[in-house]
Every structure is written in structure tokens, then in C-alpha cells.
Amino acid sequence: MRPASIPFLLALICASHCTADSGADNRNHHDVKIVSHSSSNDGEGVKVSRSEADTVCSVCSRFGTKLLPNNRPLPGLPGLTCEYLQEYDVGLKPSDSPECIGLLDLFENRCCDLSAFPESYECETTIRSSLFHDSYDPTVRPVQTMNTPHGTMRAVDVKTVITFLTLRSLDIKASILEIFVAIDLTWNDPRLRWDFNQTNCAPTVTVRANPSIEETEIWVPSLDLRSRASSAQDLPNSLATVRSDGTVSWMRLGPLNAICSFVGLPRMPFDDLGCRLYFGDNDVNTVVNYKLVDLGNNLTKGFQYYPAFNQSYTEYSQIREKTRTDYNLEYSENEFHLDLYFGRANRHYITFSIFPTIIFTLMSFGQFAIHVKSGERLSFSITIVLITVAQSIVTADILPVCNEMIWLNVFNFVSMLFTLLGILETLLILWFFTVASRKQAKEKEVKEDEELHNLISNDVGLDPNLEEDDANSGEGQNDEFTPVTQRETRITNNEDDDMTKQNKTWKDLKIVRTFTQRPKTPEEVVDRIDFLCLIFLPIAYTLFIVIMFAANERWGEDPSWA
């Protein structure tokens, strides 16, 4: 095994221990006398000076015994020995660092010669008997006098780290966010200190910790989610770890349900959905300060994402770079907030909502190409409207009912208006064509009656024989002159047709004639209206789509978190 791989493996193994120790008060870490530690190849104890032991981490420093160099502390890594561990990882860390304390908790029982000490359970039993007697009251807060940049005051400092594990659900209709987190709290209780010696030979003990006074052995902070649908006090119970200097580490894992005032939702489905979680102590007049531990990012103190877990095939994903933490008030550390942002998988909405809406709306304009006399036109229009309404109902099921204008709601609503505008035009021209056709038919009937009446009036008084002679005379003339006349007429007509075809200009285009020539019949009027709708409505709808997508980034106003 290469030496470079050891720190990486150990960092993964002791991640939880080191995280818990990162917020610990490092007071009295050296209350145990260090006798010796081993760094030689033969495993013999080598005496070191007090100053060197104070600066270099050693696996067996707390017990003051020798290292067992050939022990293999991790069965899964047979090449890793305690000697190798001391040389390439533990020995490279400062003795008062959280990483050193975490490694000692993990490996001192596996790498140190503890034959001179009682068994661990005997040590812990003795320590617990001395700690939890009648004088310890879990309702009393371990308030201590401390020096701060603002002066000397009495308070309890609780180092706080919240680890985001996974998103369980995000219900925008109910404004509920459910996440799975680990809340790690570390504080110092001077009543829980003990002197490490041959009898009190355990560096740490485990105790029962619970928000309920009846079920806890020690005092615990009452940190809770202020904007909650479920309380952080209801998280599953877990044991706390107490060190010999009185430092208590308590980590609880479980779901948190928060009531959110979402930001970014008006831009749905292209939104980055934000939710602010408010945390604070249940006791308003408490003297507990929740110190957000600096984990390397000044913008997210006291918060981290669990690195080994990434969700897949989910609607929402974390936007880690937008996460923020801060105190609610500059002069108070009793309350703080956490801003979480989630990106939406908008491809689903584009594929199954936006794209079908656009296609169905554009298809609805095809009714203008169907002649008004065809009965299929009205059926086609109604079918398109029903499809659009069904699509809107499906989309509305995932949107919250609110007064704010949501981008997807507006897009679907206006698209439906374009579809309804087309069917309204169809109904109007059907009405117009029906009325105009009836009027034209009535006028034609009246005209035919007048022509028949005039014809009967003109035929009265004519001599039938004279009429017959005129008819015969005309037939003879037609026989003689008609062939030449018809031939000349056909020649003239053909020449006119050729000239007409050769002299076609831009004035003969349909779109030009639509605006320059006046329709003469109701059918021409209807055709002209359909042609205009077929040109302008798709153009108007296309412009609407462009404007909506361009305005999405600046759409709507988010609620204020201030």
C-alpha cells in the first residue's frame, strides 16, 4: 500500500469522529501525562520530551503506553499496521487537532498495549458512577463565565454543524420541504469532567441524551427548527459521547419538515427553488449561543453536504454553490438560518407540457386552411380545444393555487386563448357565411322572379308565324357566318389568354390581392378572413413564445426573507 493512500482512507473512516470533534472545546486535552510512544521499527517504546509530545499526535499518548507496531487495526486492509499508521498519518497531525482526537478514539484500543489497565467497560462503569450522582441535575444549564470580544459574560457555547444527507420530498403545493440531516452539537459541561488515571481509565464514556428530561442523563441544548412542520426534538434518540475534559458531542440523524416561503417559484419550470430554514433555541430567554463551525467556507459556516451520497433520478437536485448560513441578528448567536436551493429537472416539463402545448396551439391554426363549407372544420377546432384543456388540467395539478403569476400558468393560459380565438373566428365566419348565403339566395330568387315576370310580359302580343320566320332566317344566317365569327373569336380569346399569362405581375399574388381587391361574394370574404388569420395568428403566437422565454429570468417577484 502506498503511503499517500493512508491519509485518504483514514479520512473516510474517521469522518464522523473528526466532524464531531471539530466543534469541541479543546481545553484540557493534555490532562493525561504522556510517558512514551513508539516510532521505531522494532516497536520498542522511545522516550520523548514533553514539548515534542505536546505538538505531535501519538496513538498511545493518552494512555502513556507503548505502540504495538505489528497489529493490524483494520482487517479489510491487511497491509496497514499500527506502525505504518503512526508514521504516515497520526504522527503528521498536531496533538490538539480534532483529527488527532478522532484517530485516537478509533485506534488506541487496537494499537496500544493496555494490559496494565482494567477492561474498558470497567473503566466506564467507574466513571459513570462518579459523574451521575444526586448532585447532577439535567435541567441546570452548564453556564460558564467566558471572555468574548464583546466582554466577559456567562453563557453556554454550543458548536453546531448541520450535515445535509438527502432530499426526501419537496411539495410546492403545501409549501413543505422534507430533508434528511445530521445535527451535530458539541458543548462543554464542567460537571462531567474526570481525571484520567489507573481507575478512571476511559478517555470517553457514552451517556443517554434526549430532549425529554425524564429520559436524559445530561443537559442537552433545545435547538429546534422554528419554521417547522415537524420538530427537531422528535428526531430519533442517540447516545452522546463525553470526554474527560467535559466536552460533550451529540449527533442526531433524521428527517426535518420545514414550512417554506419559496423563492424562484414564479419562474417555474426554469426556477432555482429556494427555502430558508430558521433555527433557534426553544427557550427564548436562554443564554445558549449556537456557534456555527467554520468548515472552510465562510458563507456556509456550520453546514456541509455529505460528500459520499448524490441522488439520481429525482425531480430536484441541490444547488450547493448557492447555499448560505447566517445569524438572524448581528448581535445575537441564539438564532440562525440556512438557505437551501434546489434545481428542477425542467426537461420533463418541456417534453410533456410546454412542447405539446406549443404543437397543439400551432395545429389549431390549421382550421383556417379548411373551407368553411366543410363540416370537418368545426369538429377539428373543438377537438384541439379539448386537447388543450386536458393538457392545462394535467399541468395545473402540479402547480400551487396562489395569486402570484407563475410563468408556466401564464404560458398555458395564453396558449389556450390563441386556440379559443381560432374557434371563435370559425364560429363567426360560419354565422356570417350562413346569413350572407341566405341573403344571397333570397336576392337571387327575387331576381329570377322578376326576370320571369319580364319575359312573360315581353312575349305577350308577338306573332307566332313571324317569330318562326325570324328564327328560320336566323338559322340560315348562322349557318353562313357563324364558323368565321367563332374562329375569329377563339383566336382573339387565345391571344388575350397568352397576353394575360405573360403580363402577370406582383399584383396577381394572393396576399397582394387580399389587401388591394375588394371581395365580391360572401365566400371571398370568408376566404380572405381565413387567409389573414392563417398568416397573422401563427406569427403573433411565435412572438409570444419568444417574449415569454426571454422574460423568464426576470419573471415575477419573490417573497422577502428579511
Image (cartoon, rainbow, N blue to C red):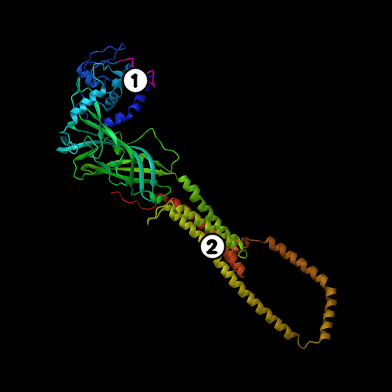
The location of residue 226, given as percent across then percent down, is: 27, 46
Q: Image quarter for residue 180? A: top left
- Whichever of labels 2 and 1 marks the residue nearer the N terminus, that label is 1
Residue 449 appears in the picture as rendered: yes
Q: Nearer the viewer, residue 108 or 378?
A: 108
The kind of residue on which mark 1 rests is Pro
Q: Nearer the viewer, residue 191 or 92?
A: 191
Please check the rendered image and state whether residue 70 is part of the magenta-colored stretch, yes or no: yes
Position of 272 compared to 118: left or right? right
- Horizontal and vertical percent position of residue 443: 63, 77
Q: Amino acid at mark 2?
A: Ile
Give the answer, above or below, for where 268 lies relative to 239: below
Is residue 366 a member of the stretch shown in magenta? no
Identify the magenta region: 68-79
Foreground residue among 97 and 17: 17
Name the quarter where the N terminus is drawn: top left
Measured as percent of width and height from the top left, residue 198 is found at 20, 19
Name the chief secondary structure element in magenta: loop
Is residue 554 visible to the viewer in this orientation of the structure? no
- According to the picture, the residue beneath numbered tag 1 turns out to be 73
Q: Nearer the viewer, mark 2 or mark 1?
A: 1
- The part of the image, by quadrant, that contains residue 207 is top left
Q: Position of residue 406 (x, y in %)?
A: 41, 53
Near mark 2 (Cα within 10 A), the count class, few <14, some 14-19 or many ≥20, is many
The image quadrant of residue 52 is top left
Q: Residue at x 65, y 79 (%)?
A: 446
Q: Which residue is mark 2?
A: 423
- 209 versus 34 height, above or below: below
* Residue 372 sits above or below residue 239 on the image: below
